[in-house]
Amino acid sequence: MKKILMATVAATALMSAFPAIALERGGSLTFARYDDSTLIDPIYADRNPDIWMVTNLYDTLLRTEADGKTITSGLAASYKVAEDGLSVELTLRDGIKFSDGSAIEGKDVVFSLNRAANPDLSPWAGLLASIDNVTSEGNKVTIGLKNSDPTIVLMLATFNTAIVSADAFESAAGETDQDKAKALSMEGFVGSGPFVMKAHQRGSMMQFAANSHYWREGEDGKPLPYIDGINFLVIPDDATRILKLQAGEVDAAEFIPFARVSEMQADANINMELFPSTRIIYSPINTRPERADGSANPLSDLKLRQALNYATNKDALVQLVLHGAGKPVSSGLMASTTQLATDNGPIYQYDLEKAKALVAEAGAEGTEITLTTLAGSADDGIILAALQQMWSDIGIKLNVEQVDGPTRGAKNRSGDFDIHTYGWVNDVNDPAQVAGWLGYNPTAKAVGTGWNNDEFNSLYEASNTEMDPAKRAEQYARMQEIYAAEAPLLFMYETPFAVALSQDIKGYVQTPLGNNEFATTWIDR
Amino acid sequence: MSSLSYFISRLLQIIPTFLIVMVIIFLLVRALPGDPAIAMADAKATAEQLEQIRERLGLHEPIWVQFAYFVKNVFTGNLGDSILMKAPVTEVILERLPASGFLALYAVLFSLLIAGPLAFVAALNRNGWIDVGIRSVFQIGLSTPVFYIGLLLLTFLAAQMRWFPVGGYGTTFWEHMYHLLLPALTVALYTSAIIMRNLRSSVIEVMDAEYVQFARAKGLPEHVILGRHILRNALISTVTLLGLSIGNLMSGTLVTETVFAVPGVGRLMLDAIFARDYPLIQGLTLTFAVLVSLIFLLTDMIQAMLDPRLRVS
């Protein structure tokens, strides 16, 4: 027994002294995707299949670690925010090159940031509204701001500020900037990321090859990426994507349905990864005094909204919809992986007695509410059945209305709903985007709920220029407190990104924002 | 009427069909609830961004102005840019059409190979156990959902036996043949059931016809009766059915395309509808209308070849 113990101790010591497996280079990865990219360009990427690929082709000035929160250097070796918060100075790394071998210079940064901040071009320009001017001298770049902006450093680590080549855009075919971006995305691709676009057949496949000029070094001291290339296959059907992985035709398959996660976990050949995400599933509640048809809206009563939240067993929903692969939200306003998220455990823990008391106080027994769900969505079907049952316990009758995505979006905008299912994934590393969408009324009527809270709105506005991190964190803590108490949503749950990989694929990461990171992926052959 | 003038008169009939389709499509697409700007910008756009998008798409113009632009563009060969794909509609459709066309023709070929011989065997053994057996098997093909047959084939023949790839389309002709074999078979199991039933009853009907009895009384050899009299006459209604099937298949193999990851127009149409991609929906529908009209024209021509009465009338 003692000998076995000694051997175990020795083995453990050895394993910690050397990496378990020697890292290997070369080989290409075949990755099954649920949808294809259309245009992978920092400013025109507006759908997740585009956004999540940008940083593989274009590098950013700063980067975030895999946790999505910690800022680290990127194409810029260092950065400094001025005392008054009105400018940021960056120093570019020496010897950085685009994939065509040309140097990445200050003029490229100026071009890229001006392009990203131009509201006529970029749908994301609003995120850079504080930028006044961008100048460069040698390897120094200075960003002048109209007002102090606590998000600006994070924005420089976000896909829309990734660096493109000014010369390549200049000489690309096409009249408009978007035409040029399209031309560049196909033939004659020039990028700054770890990979280059090699081929793209819309709707079926896309190929990336390693960028031999990429600057970041791997653990072996040589430049990244480790693999020679990636073949993406577009396989919209969940079951087919999984079969393809099981048959060994692909090395990885994304968006594994949660119902099949445990089956994948039991398969010895498959490494089932559940990457923490900023994805939250929630249901906006119409808080306006009147419904769209002019009738009185019972949901304008805070007590009823709180009652619905208490009567909803989120743990049960997580089991039913996600088969346990998720958790109830702990901040109503954002996923727990978001910066500045408060986490004091799940909010509105299931409490039937409290819910009944609140319904009685609101005099809302027998109220009929309509849940608008997405037609054809299995998840929404389960949510509806569960809520119908849970809420019947407090005397609320839940009806259903099934619509497709665009109709649901239009109903959200016009306030023509009682409650509807919805979801969100952050695109940027700062909570301002999600807080603006879910809570700040002027952006989109607090995710269509019509909720309008003066204290929340002023805190949000103040937080957008607050440079003291501690103060800003306080503001966010208070906003989250108000939001939870006011319950403009039916708070539900957070879900991870479920990716199944063959056991020999190492180092693949999907960040909390959804970005597919292939730079450090390697194949154990 | 000569064959040529028959052909031309049928070709001219396509024009009004095309015009009617244009009006219907234009109006139907706009009758869909939901705003393309919202569908396009996802949930995250601000009211200002939505306005910009509407402006860019010309959605502010009165509907008749939008229609006038649409008609003008169609006749100048410009179907606009797809909102979803950020590329010209014609380019997107032309990229996707070959896969669907290949699959449709492949499936029809399979259907004929399966249904043709079996229909004759069944008809010649009318109500015998072979006939009942064949019809029962096809009944299963007819009553099982396409996606289920597809998944079964994928699971056993592709994922487990590894005889075929799990979905995809390939790049060369032979790769297409290999990749599309299972999806084509999946579709064919359904269409061949319909064709088999139709052909079997036509053959039985023709076999009882007086001209066949007469041919037999004349003492013609059985293979001549079968080939010249029975087959040719029995095929007339089957050709119509076949034309309808190809028309359906060109636009309607959505489920098969999704399950087998075939980059065809069926899947594209669904994506376009969900994205309220007006230009793409219109472009696809017009393409389908032209294709179906041309296939029907071809069907009519083949029928006219088989049945001289049609040319005369």
Image (cartoon, rainbow, N blue to C red):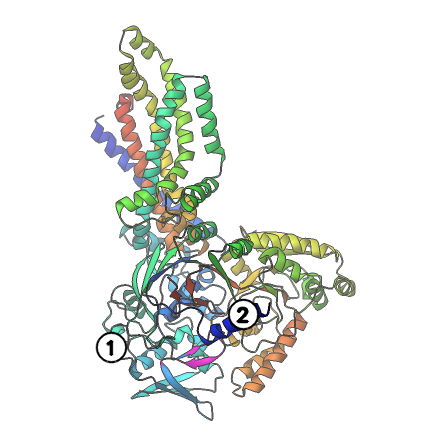
For residue B276, above or below residue A127? above
Q: Which quadrant is home to the C terminus of chain B?
A: top left
Dot 2 crowding, Cα within 10 Å, few <14, some 14–19, many 20+: few
Where residue A110 is drawn, which disc sits there? none
Q: Residue at x 55, y 72 (%)?
A: A6
Chain of residue at mark 2: A
Q: Which residues are magenta?
A: A63-75
Element class at badge 2 = helix
Chain of residue at mark 1: A
Overall secondary structure of the magenta stretch? loop
- Report the Cα–Cα distance between label 1 and label 2: 53 Å
The residue type indicated by label 2 comes to Thr
Q: Residue at x 58, y 82 (%)?
A: A473
Q: Position of residue B216 (x, y in %)?
A: 31, 9
Viewed as shown, does residue A124 lie left or right of B108?
Answer: right
For residue B13, above or below residue A217? above
Element class at badge 1 = loop
Q: Residue at x 35, y 54 (%)?
A: A204
Q: Which quadrant is home to the N terminus of chain B?
A: top left
Q: Which is more N-terminal, label 2 or label 1?
A: 2
Where residue A8 is drawn, which disc sits there? 2
According to the image, label 1 marks what residue? A102
Residue A359 colored in magenta in the image: no
